[in-house]
Amino acid sequence: MSSTRDTPSKAEIDAMPPFPALGLANIRIPASGREFADAAADLLRCRYIGFDTESKPCFKPGELSDGPHVVQLTTLETAYLFQLHQQACHAVVAAILESSKVIKVGFGLKSDRGHLLRKLGIRPRALLDMNQLFRSEGYRKEMGVKAAVAVVLERKFQKPKRVSTSNWALAVLKPNQLLYAANDAFAALKVLEAMHKPEAELLALLGAAQTR
């Protein structure tokens, strides 16, 4: 393992240029059988895709989340946001998440496993939690996408709390929600791409995660 490393300070991150995020033109919200099929074809052709979920937050004591409400899956060109209130998308989401050929890349994915199993009966395979990769690089803390973008890409990644804690169960998501959700998943994939890790190393991390 490498020697212990630290992440940039908030001031250092704030001084960095902004992350080149996906715009609305590159975000798809599939809503029909044809759109679900097209999204699946695009995502399943990839070896690595970005992955994240969003859930409506709980603010009352004892309130239990019925999320996730959105599943984000991205290529290096396009983000697909699947709104889980649409029953028709569940089979497509399951096919992609349960595929062992497509590696899903994200941060802090442990909780997503349980939530997806509870809500959809999905047991995701080939999940590459980037926090594991950064731990192998000598970073002690949970990295998170914002710090990872700063370390690897030397860019500032915006994560507005007012958007992260917004209502993800809405039937029609707002533009700022679309941008937030899409780029959370997209940024993880861009960080992995920039690290230029050999696949053997990544597969070893996946194997270690499966045995835990």
Image (cartoon, helix red, strand yellow):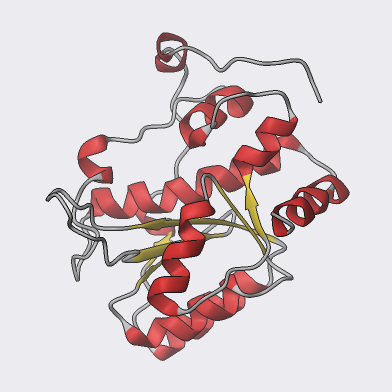
Residue 6: percent from the left, percent from the top?
60, 15
- Residue under the point 42% across and 90% down: 33
- Residue under the point 26% across and 61% down: 65
Locate the C terminus by quadrant.
bottom right
Numbered label tally: 0
Name the image quarter holding residue 42: bottom right
Q: Is residue 42 above or below residue 89?
A: above
- In this rendering, does residue 69 appear at all? yes
Residue 159: percent from the left, percent from the top?
34, 35
User: Is residue 6 toward the left or the right of residue 171 in the image?
Assistant: right
Residue 197: percent from the left, percent from the top?
80, 40
- The residue lying toward the viewer, choosing from 153 and 93, is 93
Residue 96: percent from the left, percent from the top?
58, 74
User: Is residue 41 toward the left or the right of residue 170 in the image?
Assistant: right
- The residue lying toward the viewer, choosing from 177 and 35, is 177
- Residue under the point 31% across and 64% down: 67
Q: Is residue 140 above or below residue 192?
A: above
Q: Is residue 130 above or below residue 93?
A: above
Name the image quarter holding residue 86: bottom left
- The residue lying toward the viewer, choosing from 5 and 18, is 5
- In this rendering, does residue 80 appear at all? no
- Residue under the point 73% across and 28% down: 137
Q: Is residue 125 above or below residue 74?
A: below
Q: Outermost residue, left direction?
A: 60
